[in-house]
Amino acid sequence: MRILCPNCGDRDIREFYYRGSAQDLHRPNLEDRLSDWHAFLHLRDNTAGEIRDLWYHEKGCNSWLVVTRNTMTHEIIKTELVKNTDERRA
Ligand SMILES: [Zn+2]
């Protein structure tokens, strides 16, 4: 599998570190129930279709990317840089 890094171009997947879902995950507070922590740490959707994942270009430009791909066809639909929080405020 290859990933198109917006900075570096078309690269082998072995250059990247997979972080997980790019969907917003609700991190429980320390005092929340154990079941909330279990869900946060271990339960994930197994989506058949389009998903967004976080990848880190570890052996390239050291950028975080959001990769949109289809789990049924393995097609990578889009790659984009993760936006800096400060940029969104500007
Ligand atoms: Zn890169």
Image: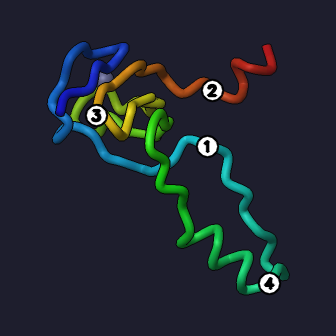
Q: Residues within 10 Å of mark 3 (few under 14, many from 20)?
A: few
Q: Viewer-proximal residue, 76 or 18? A: 76
Mark 4 belongs to which amino acid? Arg
Kindly identify which residue carries mark 3.
74
Q: Tag 2's secondary structure?
A: loop
Mark 1 belongs to which amino acid? Gln
Q: Residue at 45% x, 37% y: name it.
A: 49
Label 2 residue near ligand 1, CB within 8 Å: no
Q: Is residue 80 above or below residue 53?
A: above
Mark 2 belongs to which amino acid? Asn
Q: Is residue 42 above or below residue 46?
A: below
Instruction: Report how far apart the C-alphas of labels 3 and 2 lie in the structure.
Output: 28 Å
> Looking at the picture, how far across and down is residue 56, in whole percent?
37, 39
Kindly identify which residue carries mark 4.
33
**Colour setting:** rainbow
Q: Tag 3's secondary structure?
A: loop
Kindly identify which residue carries mark 2.
84
Q: Quadrant of the N terminus?
A: top left
Q: Earlier in the sequence, mark 1 or mark 4?
A: 1
Q: Earlier in the sequence, mark 4 or mark 3?
A: 4
Q: Residue at 41% x, 21% y: name it.
A: 79
Kindly identify which residue carries mark 1.
23
